[in-house]
Image (cartoon, helix red, strand yellow):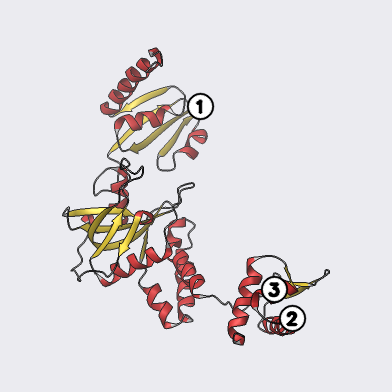
Amino acid sequence: MPKTSARLLSLLSLLQARRDWPGPLLAERLGISPRTLRRDVDRLRELGYPVVAVKGPDGGYRLDAGTRMPPLLFDDEQAVALAVALRAAGATGAGIEDAAARALATVRQVMPARLRHRIDALDVTAVGPSAAGTRDEADGDVLMALGAAVRAHEELRFDHVPSGPPGTGGGPVPATRRVQPHHLVTRGGRWYLVAWDLDRDDWRVFRADRVTPRLPTGPRFAPRDVPGKDVAAFVTGRFRGSGHSAEWPCRGEVVLRRSAASVAPHVPDATVEELGPDRCRLTLGSWSWPALAAAVGAFDCDVEVVGPPALREAFAHLARRFADAARSTGNA
């Protein structure tokens, strides 16, 4: 029979996993007798956990909502998951960064040394608020391995699945990369590794869910600064196609025949100025002039281009392309 403390942790974990547990089933899952189960439930209640009895043919138990915060018990995986979530809290855009940092410090104090070592290796940079619908699950062990290599300044080899065309087997062909890992970043619901690519002699940003680290790690290296010395700005610039700057490479201004209230919710990264009941000035950016013109066209209203001339030319280019598409027969 497991020790009492281990049984209590397992019992608490099971009670948190589902609403109601029949007594006999719960005792069977724990490998204990119904009498021992009743004693363990009483111990949890003494610790402050509101475990209530559920009436029924077999009887059962439920972890109810309490009036005060009881002592919390986590297994190793739960503790690491909690720390990862608190590290990434800055990406939520909810203004809870300081509270998350204090919570992480509190949790860390009661962690055993083996877990503190893993958590301390995970230094995360949050870049912008999370975007809905762009979650890609990165393996927790992979994140820990990447974070440890970043903290130790050790070269890393990994297999990376590119986003290019598939290989002969039908899927993308993984490529082995040798890098000096510098930063672990979370952006828009995804995790990224910012690293100096040794074979390409340049900075690269890798999606963590496409990385499989190879161990052991390589020799230590002297860390260097990313261009601009601002990791968040560097990563944002890479995704916007503007190199090392966080600004969009193409930025223009138009007047739309729509109200500012109907436009603003759809362009959170733009400036919208109300000019009248059904007229507003919109200033926004994109990675190319045609993409910027297409984004404006999505509002399906009359548009007046204020500038620059490159945006006006992009509208003319798209007009010719769309006109050709409208005249096409659709035959291959």
The earlier-in-sequence mark between 1 and 2 is 2
Q: Which residue is mark 2?
A: 34
Q: Amino acid at mark 1?
A: Asp
Q: Which residue is mark 1?
A: 278
Q: Using residue 323 as the reference point, say whether residue 195 is left or right of it.
A: left
Q: Amino acid at mark 2?
A: Pro
Whole-percent x and y of residue 149?
29, 68
Could you say whether the residue bearing mark 3 is in a helix, strand or loop?
helix
Q: Amino acid at mark 3?
A: Leu
In depth, the one of 285 and 119 nearer the eye is 119
Q: Which residue is mark 3?
A: 26
Q: Is residue 184 above or below residue 237?
A: below
Q: Is residue 3 above or below residue 10?
A: below
Whole-number angstrom distance, CA of label 3 to CA of label 1: 64 Å
Q: Residue 3 lies in what quarter of the image?
A: bottom right
Q: Quarter of the image containing the C terminus?
A: top left
Q: Is residue 308 above or below residue 157?
A: above
Query: What residue do we see at 37% from left, 15% from top?
Result: 323
Q: Is residue 244 above or below residue 296?
A: below
Pointer 3: residues within 10 angstroms few (<14), some, or many (20+)?
many
